[in-house]
Amino acid sequence: MSIDLRAAAVEYLQARRARGHRLARHEGLISSFLDGLAAQNATTITRDNVVAFATAPAGTGRAWQAFRLSTIRGFAAYVHGLDPDAAQLIPSRLLPASYARRIPYLYSPAQISDLMTRSTALLPPLMGVTMTAFIGLIAVTGLRGGEAIVLDVDDFDAGQGLLRVTGKYGRERVLPLHPSTVTALTTYRQARAGMTPTPVDGPFFVGATGRRLRHASAQKMFRLVVDACDLPTSPGARPPRIHDLRHTFAVNSLIDAHRDGVDVDARIAVLATYLGHVNPLNTYWYLTASAELMALVSDRITAHRQARP
């Protein structure tokens, strides 16, 4: 049986996305892999050409190579199921690589306040009020930047103080908001209504043109604000990101739990749901993300050991 690899790629991605996978990078990588096969007049997927694709270009990190290989590995398995002669099965861990989480930039309350204050000076004014509310919402809820960007007007229920969020894999969650957050979002909605038409079912956060805020625009504006704030960074560390506001929220939530003597496992379970973590193990990672939090954990462990008979 002859397989059209391009058509198979479309069917493979459609099938996986129908099961809730977002696959943000997979389509481009698979297309690039198939371009390489076409350039070599190759019509089958083999271990050799998959490894060659995964390890190119020279000098890329092992983690990225392993991700490229795993992307094609899944596609190869799909094609193999259609026609074993069209693709070899690619073994797992063919390119072993460990993933090291980057150390997050943890903002102080004063730094977050400064970021929001300086955002109001962004031009045009519509972008200024949007970025101020955008940064503030992520800082107090721990939303992912992409989750905030896709919010629509009707996702915010000011009367009930609730926010409907669509997270990874299309999973929805409803977040209770602090009254001050409700007031801030209501104020933003009123401010932008005076600058651009506000459709009932349109985007909540809008950019300079009045259309939905774009991720690239948010990143660019955030970089301008960070530079204006002149935030200190450690040597060799990456500059502060929007996503680090989410990390800061999570770490501060756990610091508060430790200081208050709350059951940390219970707090992590709640926090995992609030943050939209599919795997709670991702929430436990925050226990190691802050020197202050690590010290508090150590103190509690020491106190527990000393209290034992």
Image (tube, rainbow, N blue to C red):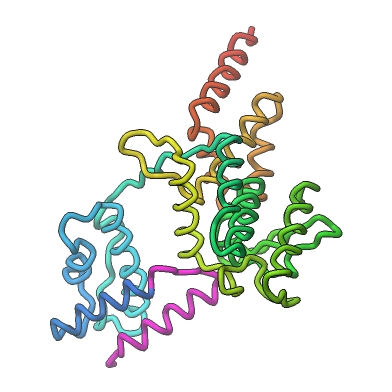
Q: Position of residue 138 (x, y in %)?
A: 61, 51
Q: Quadrant of residue 205?
A: bottom right
Which one is nearer the viewer's eye here, 142 or 82? 142
Image point (49%, 69%), residue name? 22
Q: Position of residue 151 (x, y in %)?
A: 65, 66
Image point (43%, 46%), residue name? 227
Total numbered labels placed on residues in the image: 0
- Residue 10 belongs to magenta span: yes
Relative height, residue 258 to residue 271 (above, below): above
Relative height, residue 167 to residue 305 (above, below): below
Q: Is residue 230 left or right of residue 272?
A: left
In the image, farthest residue toward the bottom: 1
Q: Is residue 261 left or right of residue 82?
A: right
Which one is nearer the viewer's eye here, 248 or 99? 248
Q: Which residues are magenta?
A: 1-26
Tell me the quadrant of the picture where the N terminus can be found.
Answer: bottom left
